[in-house]
Image (cartoon, helix red, strand yellow):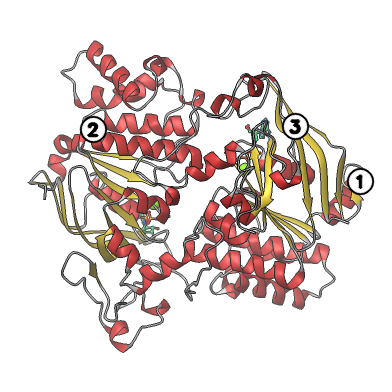
Amino acid sequence: MALLRIRNLSVDFATASGKFRAVDSMDVTVDRGDILAIVGESGSGKSVSMLAMMGLLPWTATITADEMSFDGIDLRSVTAAQRRKIIGRDMAMIFQEPMSSLNPCFTVGFQIRESLRKHMNMSRRERHQRAIELFEQVGIPEPEKRLGVFPHQMSGGMNQRVMIAMAIACRPRLLIADEPTTALDVTIQAQILELLTGLQRDTGMALILITHDMGVVAETAQRVSVQYAGQKVEEQPVRPLFSTPHHPYTAALLAALPERATSKILPSIPGVVPGQFDRPKGCLFSPRCSKADDRCREIEPENQPEELGRAKCHYPLGVNEPEMAQ
Amino acid sequence: MNKPVVVAHDLTRHYEVGGGIFSSTQTVEALSGASFTLQPGKTLAVVGESGCGKSTLARVVTMIEPPTSGTLMIDDEAVSPDKWASLRSSVQIVFQDPYGSLNPRQRIGDILMEPLVINRKDMSAKDREAQARDMLAMVGLRREHFDRYPHMFSGGQRQRIAVARALMLNPRVLVLDEPVSALDLSIQSQVLNLLVELQEKLGLAYLFISHDLSVVKHMADDIVVMYLGRPVETGPIEDVVANPRHPYTKALLSATPIADPTIEKKRIKLEGELPSPINVPKGCAFSPRCWKATEECRAKRPVLDEGRHRVACYHPEG
Ligand SMILES: Nc1ncnc2c1ncn2[C@@H]1O[C@H](COP(=O)(O)OP(=O)(O)OP(=O)(O)O)[C@@H](O)[C@H]1O
Ligand SMILES: Nc1ncnc2c1ncn2[C@@H]1O[C@H](COP(=O)(O)OP(=O)(O)OP(=O)(O)O)[C@@H](O)[C@H]1O
Ligand SMILES: [Mg+2]
Ligand SMILES: [Mg+2]
């Protein structure tokens, strides 16, 4: 049984100008010990899909799914009390904006001990010890001293590390990390990523990593899911994804990496992601795709088979050169 | 070699902080001893950890703040605050955040014309408008975008607008403070391409601040690596990347993730944190975290050696 299984998840927002589909028929499967990266342009629904699963979207959002289960529990029908029990303990999230999830009125030490008190059977003393240990793990210097500090008294990078410490405090079985290292320097980033992959190795924690840093993806993930305009357009293990992308969007994204540049002018994807009012009829990527023809503009593509990364494309790439990296 | 547009010598910027009820004033040594030149058509990149003084350097070069000491020459003219007004049009800045740096209530046209209204009072309104519309075309937008508001544009388009505004006074130097850090990959490449094209067309000199080494490698001709307010290594980008001489540069390069899953990486682990610029260590600022540090390093700060590829270290690599 998969740890997390989502089938056909869609999220619609009611906005002043009408309905807006932020997530469109998404599937996600994560097993114990998996590291799945989700990549894709800004606004492609990466955060919203995860927030939907955790029940953290505002009332303006309408969520539909054929299946949404964690460890066999149907997340669509759990009570609020059951959900609170799961979230924060078995399933934890590092949010994209660290400040929004720390309470400015309490010291960071209080917040971390409180979460341990709620979810773990620990004595006061053990909670204090564990808080110090966590701060050490995420590289916060002088942890004893920092526990008594308020969020606004620390830098963005330091708060992000507090957030990470809180997320892993109760030894979650699934950690969702939404841009966990963007506010951090590369040397600290390396340390945090090592900590997270270490937890995955040692405790079998599964990790969903949302990031736009393809370097982090290449070094951390086992599988990569590529999202475009709310849809998953491709999913592959990390090596073949980088060597043989099957969806033209994935290929275009990789071509835009400065590391891969062959001249001073980088290949770039013309245009922007479709919005509420200019959602095309057929393939959502067709207006920006160099390979699109009338069929792409008229008919929404089905997913290709597993061997082709389930690419949502009529004309998948790399069909004649399968799995070079295997 | 071309004649440099900017010559910076020993630029230093300190801030006095504190002095509240409980503490006496303290000095933040945000920037110390920064020397470099900027050439027309060339890019100098500045890299280093958060808080190492990159933005402070940007503000001093853009004449937003005076240096505490050191000299800045622009086109052979020594800069002093009384000359700021006349020299400022030569050096313009683009900030990181394409959302925060544009006033949401101003039309794009007014945003672009503002520098002209302030600095070119002799220009007619009609000429100002014509120049703004031309500039929109130059940065890959449309002339009719003149009447729109910032919220109608994507992040990449907003960054184009910010670049357009910076170019309105025909500067010779652009200071780019993390210009693509808030953008995703496909938009990043559009903005980088724009910068490359403009540099070629207009012979601009760039001071390019970034923490993304893959972007820096792509854009820069030369690089300055800063640590705790001071340059610790500088030289041509290929040399520094291929043969980093300062242990800190080496650690920084080794910590940068590479977008290639087939590469096995050996990482240098750094102990400890970037120390505070309030209590700068006496010797080499990097010595508390350096695996090569000796008594000498802790006692006396090393200075940059001579040559094209310079390093401030008693025990350089290679
Ligand atoms: N509360 C909301 N009401 C209406 N629209 C929303 C709301 N929250 C998010 N959206 C929209 O849903 C879409 C997906 O947003 P999401 O935050 O998931 O993007 P993302 O892929 O995480 O992007 P980024 O990489 O920038 O974080 C966006 O177009 C966003 O504007
Ligand atoms: N006006 C000020 N008063 C006091 N200290 C300041 C001031 N401006 C900057 N500093 C301090 O100077 C140091 C250098 O700051 P600066 O913003 O230049 O760093 P940076 O390298 O741009 O960092 P980042 O990568 O996070 O943007 C920091 O320790 C900062 O807190
Ligand atoms: Mg997001
Ligand atoms: Mg800065």
- Secondary structure category for the residue under label 2: helix
Q: Quadrant of the C terminus of chain A?
A: bottom right
Give the labeled residue for mark 2: B201
Residue at screen point 33% across, 87% down? B294
Disc 3 marks a residue whose amino acid type is Glu
Q: Is residue B161 left or right of residue A172?
A: left
Q: In this figure, what is the number of numbered marks?
A: 3
Q: Give the letter of the chain under mark 2.
A: B
* Residue A252, image x, y percentages: 53, 39
Q: Which mark is residue A302?
A: 3
Please, which chain is the residue tagged with disc 1 on?
A
Label 1 near ligand 1 (CB < 8 Å): no
Task: Report which residue position mark 1 lands on.
Answer: A79
For label 2, count other residues whose C-alpha is less than 10 Å away and answer few (under 14), some (14-19) or many (20+). few
Q: Position of residue B15 (x, y in %)?
A: 31, 58
Q: Give the image quarter of residue A61.
A: top right
Residue extending furthest toward the left: B76
Chain of the residue that carries numbered disc 3 in the rendered image: A
Residue A118 location, quadrant = bottom right
Q: Quadrant of residue B222?
A: bottom left
Say whether marks 1 and 3 touch (CB < 8 Å): no
Percent from the top left, x then y, of residue B314? 26, 81
Mark 1 and mark 3: Cα distance apart in space: 35 Å
Residue toward you, B52 or A214: A214
